Image: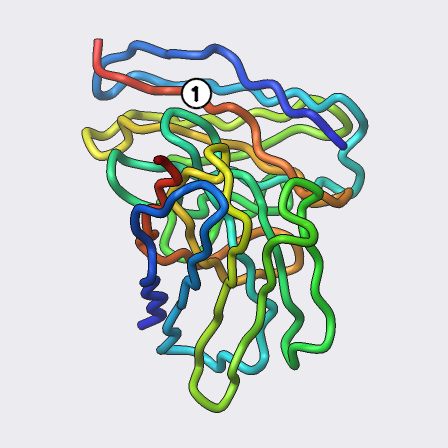
Amino acid sequence: EVQLVESGGGLVQPGGSLRLSCAASGFTFSSNWMHWVRQAPGEGPVWVSRINSDGNTTRYADSVKGRFTISRDNAKNMLFLQMNSLRAEDTAVYYCARGAGGYYNAWGQGTLVTVSS
Amino acid sequence: EIVLTQSPGTLSLSPGERATLSCRASQSVSSGYLAWYHQKPGQAPRLLIYGASSRATGIPDRFSGSGSGTDFTLTISRLEPEDFAMYYCQQYVTAPFTFGPGTKVDIK
């Protein structure tokens, strides 16, 4: 069974940092592109970042470029999102998702990030 | 960036009825690179349809997708109790890949 389990969310002050993790199991993690997608309360999902299968290529939404860094450890089946200079508008549930040619065919349960003073 | 608009915002129906959800794109979504997801409260989105009309693994055949260009439709032939949820469309033809604002299907 495919499983994606996120962790690392929490309450952080504006300007602060958090590192999200996603543990993958049940599939060949090293063969899949992986993504972070976030969803603010009451809104639709928004793509944040993606990384290719070997970790050599990354892309970011303009809203997080220069502040967030996606990475992966294929030996440990782990995906990460380092979030710096956090803003109130970054408040959302963050999901890791398995990419499949542009759509997402597996999602974690999400981890809530709240940016507030 | 391709903007997706979904209508109606809310669809109030009874179990057993047919649901028709619309997704309109601001530019052509060529090759049918459009997906549909549903999401229940407190849960992650789940893939229903990809390639505009292909059902994802394990999705029952009461769900069907159609459309091309800028207009796409998700149809649920007979609503089951577990189908009352939010539904989102997503385009993956042009980066950044974007989602619509959603249609809520609730019980009448």
Instruction: In this rendered view, identify the residue nearer to me: B41 or A110.
Output: A110
Left or right of A103 in this view: B88: left
Q: Quadrant of residue B78?
A: top left
Query: What residue is at 40 percent from the left and 68 percent from the top?
Result: A22
| Quarter of the rendering occupied by the C terminus of chain B | top left
| Quarter of the rendering occupied by the N terminus of chain B | top right
Label 1 is found on which chain of the structure? B
Q: Position of residue B96 (x, y in %)?
A: 71, 43
Query: What residue is at 23 percent from the left and 30 percent from the top?
Result: B80
Query: Is residue A63 positioned above or below B83 on the image?
Result: below
Q: Secondary structure at mark 1?
A: strand
Instruction: In this rendered view, identify the residue nearer to me: A53 or B12.
Output: A53
Tally of numbered tags:
1
Left or right of A75 in this view: A3: left
Query: Is residue A44 positioned above or below A53 on the image?
Result: above
Left or right of B41 in this view: B30: right
Residue farthest toward the bottom in the current orientation of the protein = A75
Q: Quadrant of residue A4?
A: bottom left
Which color scheme did the rendering employ for the protein?
A: rainbow
Left or right of A12 in this view: A34: right
Residue tagged 1: B103
Query: What residue is at 61 percent from the left and 55 percent from the top?
Result: A49
Query: What residue is at 38 percent from the left and 11 percent from the top?
Result: B10
Q: Position of residue A79 (x, y in %)?
A: 48, 71
Q: Position of residue A8 (x, y in %)?
A: 33, 61
Q: Quadrant of residue A9?
A: bottom left
Crowding around mark 1 (Cα neighbors within 10 Å: few <14, some 14 to 19, many 20+) is many
What kind of residue is marked 1?
Answer: Thr
